Image (cartoon, rainbow, N blue to C red):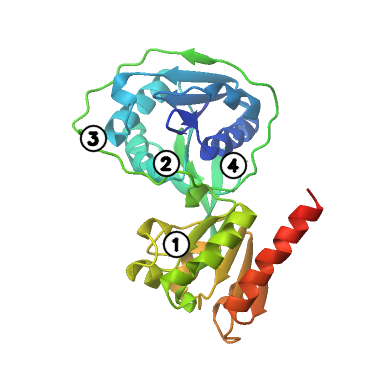
Amino acid sequence: MVLVLAETLDGKVRKTALEAVFYGAKAAEVLNAKCIAIVLGPCSDGGKLAGYGAAEIWHIDDPGLQTFDSQVFSKVITNIASEHQAKLIILSDSSTGRNLLGRIAASLKAGSVRGANTLPEIKEGKLHFNRPVFSGKATATCRINTDIAVISLMGNSLKPQTTGSEGTMKKIEVPIPSSNTKVINVKRSVGIVPLPEAEIVVSAGRGMKESSNWKIVEELAETLGATTACSRPVADSGWRPHHEHVGQTGIAIRPNLYIAIGISGAIQHLAGVNSSKVIVVINKDPEAPFFKAADYGVVGDLFEVVPRLTEALKEFKASHH
């Protein structure tokens, strides 16, 4: 059995859950097994997971699962995996998945791979997974020598596709251990796609000169339906909130399109974004290091280029509406 944790947010299935379940269904085909999605805590739309390949959707709803606690969640998942003899447990490579990966692997005495980005292969009777290393500059192939494997799936590794119709969640009873942690308050950005889940990201750096100039970045992002991000110096200066900081010391992302505006491309920043499928760089310095990593580059004054790009995109959208 392949067991997939389908993460939720505010009682709704997250995009990462769709990716994980779709990946789990494909992995189950490789293993000639059944893909089971598990949903922990309140959820109103878990039935959609059947459309992405889940053979069954198991829902464990309990007051003890309303807020995330890695100790509680890991014990619940471990109990389910042990009872049903799961051979592969799949998590999203999110803060939740990374918190759970080591705990579950240690409890099950299972081999683990963080940030897998390809479907598993069976070689000489062992599961093999690929994962990026050295900030995405190379790929490592990891062999699992144990009977059970636990992995976290890198975001945007496989584009989830519906393969069937919606199903229904099956309520199952699992002992819920008491939590040693009490959540007093949760503060979360609302109204935007979280950076790890964003397919398009528009990011800017110190080339913006001051925070009051950020309007042109936000307008471009709004036109593209993108999430905004920034480099570390911008966040450290207080121009933008720290949750928008991408890079080695911030959030590592891999969107389908990453537009870097006025960012020189220091190695620390590149390490967090160079797994993006397409990188577009806008910078007036033709020697900016970022151009070496770019798929497309525009050498020019961002205060001229960005508004013109936004206008061109608006015209394109209007003519193709």
Q: Secondary structure at mark 2?
A: strand
**Above/below status of 193 relative to 166:** below
Label pair 1/4, CB-CB below 8 angstroms:
no
Report the amino acid beneath label 1.
Val
Q: Which residue is mark 1?
A: 246
Q: Secondary structure at mark 3?
A: loop
Q: Residue 207 at what x, y percent from top left?
A: 49, 78
Q: Which mark lies nearer to you, 3 or 2?
A: 3
Q: Which badge, 1 or 4, is on the more N-terminal residue?
A: 4
Q: Residue 285 at what x, y percent from top left?
A: 57, 86
Q: Looking at the rendered structure, which numbered label has been put on residue 237?
A: none
Label 3 neighbourhood size at 10 Å, few (<14), some (14-19), many (20+)? few
Q: Which residue is mark 2?
A: 111
Q: Looking at the rendered structure, which numbered label has been put on residue 120?
A: 4
Q: Which badge, 1 or 2, is on the more N-terminal residue?
A: 2
Q: Looking at the rendered structure, which numbered label has been put on residue 183?
A: 3
Q: Residue 276 at what x, y percent from top left?
A: 58, 60
Who is closer to the viewer here, 118 or 208?
A: 208
Report the amino acid beneath label 4.
Pro
Question: Is residue 303 visible from the viewing direction of this image?
Answer: yes
Q: Residue at x 68, y 68 (%)?
A: 309
Q: Residue at x 52, y 25 (%)?
A: 37
- Report whether 278 appears left or right of 81: right
Label pair 3/4, CB-CB below 8 angstroms:
no
Report the amino acid beneath label 3.
Val
Report the amino acid beneath label 2.
Gly
**Above/below status of 273 relative to 303:** above
Quote the CA–CA distance across marks 3 and 4.
37 Å
